[in-house]
Image (cartoon, rainbow, N blue to C red):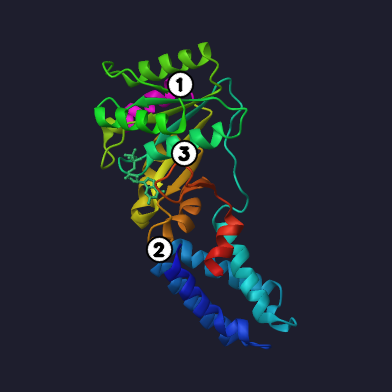
Amino acid sequence: MFDNLSDKLDKALHVLKGHGSITEVNVAETLKEVRRALLDADVNFKTAKEFTNTVKEKALGQNVLTTLQPGQLMVKLVKDELTQLMGGETAGINLSGAPSIILMSGLQGSGKTTFSGKLANYLKNKKTKKPLLVACDIYRPAAINQLHVVGDQIGVEVYSEPENKNPVAIAQNAIAHAKQNGHNVVIVDTAGRLAIDEAMMNEIAEVHQAIKPHETLFVVDAMTGQDAVNTAKAFNDRLNFDGVVLTKLDGDTRGGAAISIKSVVDKPIKFIGTGEKMDAIDVFHPARMADRILG
Ligand code: GDP
């Protein structure tokens, strides 16, 4: 994961890691390299600039150069700041409802349906949860089938109404069905389009308004780099979602989306997808991710 970024940051920090004493010039050069590594990883310019400026200010504030192990302290400052940039703390999802309603949003191909299944499986394994998956894609019958396949695979019921062309009604009927059948979590998988368009945004906004989810998650393909961040912004402007799911982190991604998304939309990454299988889901831990990136 993020091998290229890790290599570049390792090289950038190498000088600091090796020296007992370092100079202002070492620090400045290192931070320049760090910024370049972030930009190469598709972190947006403003985020990368703010990142290195903050590390620099903290280094000055702590009089890093006069400490015993200035290099180690600088590396720690970079790691801490990277953790903060990715949200600081781990953010959970709101499961307080009876049932808890979770709405999935995102573009087609982002991994929404796969993630809906993974989340249902993850919650089901917690024993106290009995999820219901809901197919709300009224355009692609294949999408409804795909959710049924996923549901069968993990032993979770899937609610669908293939003849109904009203996603709001389907979602509402599904919630009523959940209440009658003892499901305490309802995961609504919505239609995705290949690009953001007004009709799609209106449709999901209507579903959102009608079912008032406890948790709205935005699913995005990490491989799409800067586009991931732009798409997140567009969805957040309409839905004011609660959290991000970053999928396909098992692929050859550069890392920019993971690093920039929180600072751009001010919403935490809550889960990551690391494969096509139903158990390839992880809670997102900013500090652990920073550790992985910095090695
Ligand atoms: P949707 O259109 O947003 O519902 O996207 P899908 O769930 O159908 O996923 C699109 C493709 O991405 C499928 O081939 C999935 O198997 C694949 N996919 C989803 N999540 C992941 C992931 O975390 N890693 C990898 N490698 N592939 C994924």
In depth, the one of 224 and 157 nearer the eye is 157
Residue shown at the point (47%, 17%) measured from the top left: 175
- Mark 1 or mark 3, whichever is nearer to me: 3
Is 137 rendered above or below residue 61?
Answer: above
Ligand 1 shows up in the quarter that is: top left
Residue shown at the point (58%, 55%) measured from the top left: 286
Highlighted range, magenta:
201-212
In depth, the one of 104 and 274 nearer the eye is 274
For residue 59, which quarter of the picture?
bottom right
Residue that badge 2 annotates: 254
Distance CA(mark 1)–CA(mark 3): 22 Å
Q: Does residue 283 appear to the left or right of 3 in the view shown?
A: right
- Mark 2 or mark 3, whichever is nearer to me: 3
Residue shown at the point (59%, 30%) measured from the top left: 95
Q: Earlier in the sequence, mark 1 or mark 3?
A: 3
Distance CA(mark 2)–CA(mark 3): 24 Å
State how many labels appear.
3
Is 36 one of the magenta-colored residues?
no
Residue that badge 3 annotates: 118
Secondary structure, mark 1, is helix
Judge: label 3 CB < 8 Å from ligand 1: yes
**Position of residue 234 measured from the top left corner of the image (x, y, whole percent):** 36, 42
**Position of residue 259 measured from the top left corner of the image (x, y, whole percent):** 48, 58
Residue that badge 1 annotates: 211
